[in-house]
Amino acid sequence: MSETGRLPSPPGRGTEGEGKSGKDLERDGDEAPPPSPCINICRMDPITQVCEGCLRTLDEIAIWSTLSNKSKQAVIDQLPTRRSSA
């Protein structure tokens, strides 16, 4: 167990900022992760291969929890273009 009394997460399975309060995130210099664009309307468009709810690809959805904050923001920044193309 760690000093916090929690079992350590398996490699690659931890959550960014897990167990930290907002103050801890600010003090550590970490940024809060961008929120998931998921709106619980999970249907893949068979032509575009993009979710009709959040406009992410299946690959983006699958790896979301492992992406860096910068990569998550890059996906989010693409969504308005995808929305206008839909």
Image (cartoon, helix red, strand yellow):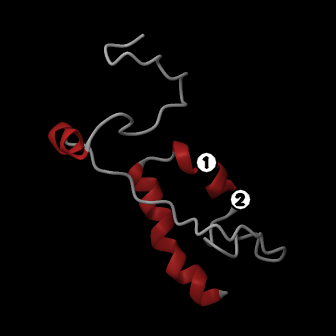
Residue 5 lies, with reference to residue 35, above or below; the image says: above
The residue singled out by tag 1 in the image is: 63
Query: Where does the image place residue 30, in percent across and percent down from the top left?
Result: 26, 43
Outermost residue to the left: 27
Q: Quadrant of residue 43?
A: bottom right
Q: Reading the chain from its start, which is encountered first: label 2 or label 1? A: 2
| Amino acid under disc 2 | Leu
Q: Give me the residue at 55% from left, 31% from top.
A: 13
* Place of residue 8 in the rendered image (x, y in percent of width and height, measured from the top left): 46, 18
Comparing 59 with 6, the one in front is: 6
**Residue at numbered disc 2:** 58
- The spot of residue 47 in percent (x, y) is 82, 77
State which quadrant residue 57 falls in: bottom right
Question: Residue at point 26% right, 41% down?
Answer: 21
Residue 31 circle label: none
- Residue 42, percent across and down? 71, 67
In 3D space, how far apart are the residues under numbered discs 2 and 1 (Cα atoms)?
9 Å
Left or right of 4, for residue 11: right
Q: Is residue 61 above or below residue 1?
A: below
Query: Few, some or many C-alpha atoms within 10 Å of disc 2 (few <14, some 14-19, many ≥20)?
Result: few
Who's the residue at 70% across and 76% down the image? 52
From what the image shows, is residue 5 above or below residue 67? Answer: above
Q: Residue furthest front?
A: 5
**Where is the N terminus found, in terms of image quarters?**
top left
- 51 sits left or right of 2 in the view: right
The residue positioned 46% from the left and 37% from the top of the image is 15
For mark 2, give the secondary structure.
helix
